[in-house]
């Protein structure tokens, strides 16, 4: 579903990604871990072209992404993204937030978009909150609306950038549980997270990013029970 070849990214003189190669198969869940500043967000942002890469190739669903506007808009529809901060439209209800993309970007009929949005809100456990405004929802509920909003675009892959980092600890579980359900349904996902237990339970593959390179990758068992790279051992030691 995603294949990245020799990806390089600079911000001015700072080289943030130094030759990333990775593959995500359809239906796979890949968790990405690594210290702050190692390039995790930049890598996700390059995958859906929120940032332009400097070098390398990105293939989505068997197609090489060429950097033309039309292609990039297509990619953004196929590759959904969920951020640490949910950024819902404050003056729109949960339902309206979820309907927005399909209506404006995909030109779907309002009635169809609404039906789909209600089903998605139900899926994330928020059918009773459809007509509430974001300010009336908890952080965990807002993040679940944000996930529903992303799914409404019917992406082939969803990228999550620390989706629970901004939440109070007691609200983390409800968001992880929605993500776990998605994984079970076979959604292809790349998830940057510090929730190691979640990564152990859900990931097919774990990637440890260190200073802009993939320093180690493997199954959760390999990464968490038998880490080899010194920096990975140190990282896991700090976080657990
Ligand atoms: P992570 O998500 O792993 O914490 P980031 O991808 O956010 O790391 O950042 C990697 C490096 O790139 C950091 O040194 C950060 O300061 C730098 N960086 C990120 N975004 C920008 C930007 N827009 N302009 C300049 N430097 C940036
Ligand atoms: Mg980040």
Image: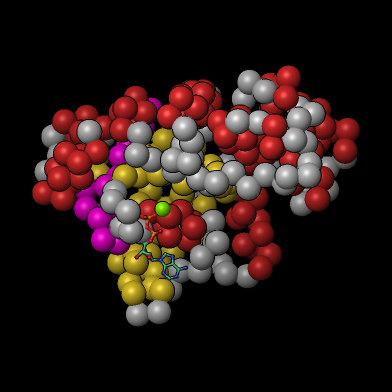
The image shows a total of numbered marks equal to 0
Compared to residue 56, the image places residue 203 above or below, namely: above
> Residue, x 26% and y 32% (percent of image)?
220
> Residue, x 32% and y 54% (percent of image)?
36
Task: Tell me if residue 102 can be seen.
Answer: no
Residue 218 in which image quadrant: top left
Compared to residue 164, the image places residue 87 above or below, namely: below
Task: Tell me if residue 187 can be seen.
Answer: yes
Residue 119 in percent (x, y) is at: 73, 24
Does the segment drawn in magenta span residue 213? yes
Residue 213 in percent (x, y) is at: 27, 59
Left or right of 116: which side holds 35? left
Report the predominant secondary structure element of the magenta stretch. strand
Image quadrant in which the C terminus is located: top left
Of 220 and 59, nearer the camera is 220
Region rendered in magenta: 202-216
> Residue, x 28% and y 51% (percent of image)?
35
Residue 190 in percent (x, y) is at: 44, 42
Q: Residue furthest bottom?
A: 13
Does the segment drawn in magenta span residue 183? no
Of 206 and 165, nearer the camera is 165
Residue 84 in percent (x, y) is at: 50, 45
> Residue, x 62% and y 62% (percent of image)?
72
Of 98 and 137, nearer the camera is 137
Compared to residue 161, the image places residue 185 above or below, namely: above
């Amino acid at each position: 579903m995603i294949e990245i070849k020799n990806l390089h990214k600079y911000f001015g003189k700072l080289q943030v990604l130094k030759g990333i190669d990775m593959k995500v198969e359809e239906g796979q869940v890949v968790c990405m871990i690594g210290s702050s500043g190692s390039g995790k967000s930049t890598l996700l942002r390059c995958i859906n072209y929120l940032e332009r890469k400097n070098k390398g190739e990105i293939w989505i669903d068997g197609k090489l992404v060429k950097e033309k506007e039309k292609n990039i808009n297509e990619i953004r529809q196929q590759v959904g993204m969920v951020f640490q901060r949910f950024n819902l439209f404050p003056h729109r209800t949960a339902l309206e937030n979820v309907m927005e993309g399909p209506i404006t970007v995909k030109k779907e009929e309002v009635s169809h978009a609404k039906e789909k949005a209600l089903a998605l809100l139900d899926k994330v456990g928020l059918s009773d909150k459809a007509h509430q405004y974001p300010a009336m929802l908890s952080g965990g509920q807002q993040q679940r609306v944000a996930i529903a909003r992303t799914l409404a675009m019917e992406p082939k892959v969803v990228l999550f950038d620390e989706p629970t980092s901004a939440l109070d600890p007691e609200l983390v579980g409800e968001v992880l549980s929605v993500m776990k359900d998605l994984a079970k349904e076979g959604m292809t996902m790349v998830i940057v997270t510090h929730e190691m237990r979640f990564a152990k339970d859900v990931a097919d593959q774990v990637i440890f990013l260190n200073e802009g390179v993939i320093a180690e990758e493997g199954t959760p068992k390999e990464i968490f029970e038998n880490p080899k790279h010194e920096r990975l051992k140190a990282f896991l030691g700090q976080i657990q």
